[in-house]
Image (cartoon, rainbow, N blue to C red):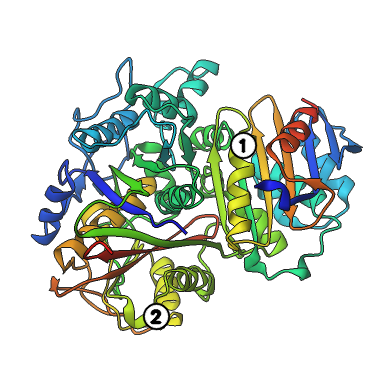
Amino acid sequence: MNDQYYISAHCSISNNIVSYNNEAVFEGTGHDIPGFLLSVYQHLGVKYPKFYKMDNLAKLGWLAAEVLLKDFDKTKYQPTDIGVVLSNAGSSLDADKRYYDSVQDIASPALFVYTLPNIVIGEICIRHHFKGENAFYIFERFNAEFISSYVSVLLETGQLQACICGWVEMTATGYKAVLFLVEKEGATPFTTENINKIYSTANG
Amino acid sequence: MKKVFLVADNIISPLGTTTAQNFEHLVNGVTGVRQHDDKAMSDGRFFASLFEKGYFQTDECWTKFEHLLIASLTEILYGVDKNISDKKTVLIISTTKGNISLLETEEPGPELDARIALHTSAKKIARHFGFVNEPIVISHACISGLVAMITGMRLIQSGQYDHVVVAGADVISKFVLSGFQSFQAVSPGLCKPFDTDRDGINLGEGAATVILSAERPDGEVIELASGAVSNDANHISGPSRTGEELFYAINKAMDTAGLKPEDIDFISAHGTATVYNDEMEAKAVTLAGLQNVPLNSLKGFYGHTLGASGLIEAIISAQSLRQNTIIPTKGFSKQGDANPVNVCSQLISKPLSNCLKIASGFGGCNAAIILTKLKTAP
């Protein structure tokens, strides 16, 4: 059922390495997670001041989408025909803890807004002007079967023409993002097996 | 495309533990929102719809959030002839913050992180009731409940599952209340959805469950006819200025269901009673040509129950269709000048067939579903 859709690009960020279509494109510097994320941002050479106010999960997802979509011609589609379906295990717990620490002093609305996992989708949609279907799911592990079948349904039923999907996880000590751009044309069939393979070969 | 039916539903709220009890209170104008003075949650007094202390409490086995889900699932699964352990049945859980209140009371560490994780709750609950498939958790801000129903609908339409049990819940604690307070988004009194003097939300606790099925029960039945989701791509904490993206979701849902504006009998709005949300919804409703259709918000009865709200309000809407009764908007009295919509302020009794339910949330997300009453089997 899935073989009429294709992975036209994929990107992973983990273990200090950014990969695009299986090729390492950047090895990060920085001694901690925020330092690493900043080094990726600087490497990309884009100017996007909103980046600085994002939490780590949103930064990670935003950077992965930036790399994923570098050659994507979104003008082929209507904004409402492009969607984003993401997943992880920890929801927004990293931001939740940072927010709750602020509550002891003065609760910070700037931190509170990131205590929802779908905010990373909102940030990607704002950046790329995507207005289609969006959803954030939580699974203990990357659920390739669910992602491949559900995104295929969205494409098959014409809800979307293109979809950015995958996994974006941020904890206090680790992170991993693996994003796929799925369209009706491309080289690699969008199957459970293929996305699982790409996910597991991503470092980390 | 397969049709998807609502075959059972339940609401657990401070107003009652069944859909019928809840609906009866709404018909009688009874609200769960009242003033609270609880220093563990807020230095000052606040209005919210909360369960009595001790009614649902975290214990060794289950958290308060899980107790709520279990109560709702137990009520709905009791006596329902649906094989939970069937391979074609799956559980979907909808929540925004789940177990987050544990951050306030428990020792930090990896164990606590694992306990808070939403997949932990989902797995425990799935096992408790005997579901065999891995449960799906959706956490998508204030539209979680509708996205959960839409996900369930699609999983049935595509033939992957025959039955989907969709349960949602959220608990109010200092974490959530302080966050909305920090946004200056909490009303100092009872909330006033769509009112010209509206001044913010009330928060609320609750749980709700619907069973969606490909099998049509006998007699009159509610169909989940369609659903659509969109994103504003504008701002992470403020709604669209134009309402165009919510309108897009409304239009898509109506189109898919084959309905025209004149076919919609009433609208169940998100209606949080913040200045910007209600204004945006009114704009979207107007763009859809639905400005004269009776519209309500139930936030004056339940407060904003976050991940449960879409489910609770969809279930009440389904009950409205069955009872041919539109619930008024508690807290509303004065229509604003900008973008007038037809806000219900009195109970309306008339034949009803189609309801539009909408919601919007942080992250710029919008959702719309259509519920349709089918009278006799074809």
Q: Give the residue number, with chain letter if any, for mark 2.
A: B260
Q: Label 2 crowding class (10 Å Cα cut-off): few <14, some 14-19, many 20+?
A: few
Can residue A105 be spotted in the picture?
no
Write down the chain letter for disc 1.
A
In x, y percent, where is residue B229?
Answer: 51, 60
- The one of B44 and B144 positioned closer to us in this rendering: B144
Q: Secondary structure at mark 1?
A: helix
What residue is drawn where x is 44% and y is 31%? B87
The image shows residue B188, relative to residue B264, as above or below, that is above
What residue is drawn where x is 19% and y is 27%? B54
Pick out the residue farthest to the front. B378
Q: Secondary structure at mark 2?
A: loop
In x, y percent, where is residue A5?
Answer: 72, 52
The image shows residue A150, relative to residue B364, as above or below, that is above
In x, y percent, where is residue B47?
Answer: 24, 50
What residue is drawn where x is 65% and y is 40%? A57
Q: How many marks?
A: 2
Q: Rounded to the nearest whole Å, what is the CA distance between mark 1 and mark 2?
A: 37 Å
Residue type (three-letter) at the residue carrying disc 2:
Lys
Q: Quadrant of residue A74?
A: bottom right
Residue B300 shown left or right of residue B337 in the figure = left
Write down the chain letter for disc 2.
B
- Residue A145 disc label: 1
Q: Quadrant of residue B42?
A: top left
Residue B346 shown left or right of residue B305 in the figure = left
- Residue A50 disc label: none
Residue type (three-letter) at the residue carrying disc 1:
Glu
- The one of B240 and B294 positioned closer to us in this rendering: B294
In x, y percent, where is residue B62?
Answer: 33, 22
What residue is drawn where x is 21% and y is 43%? B13
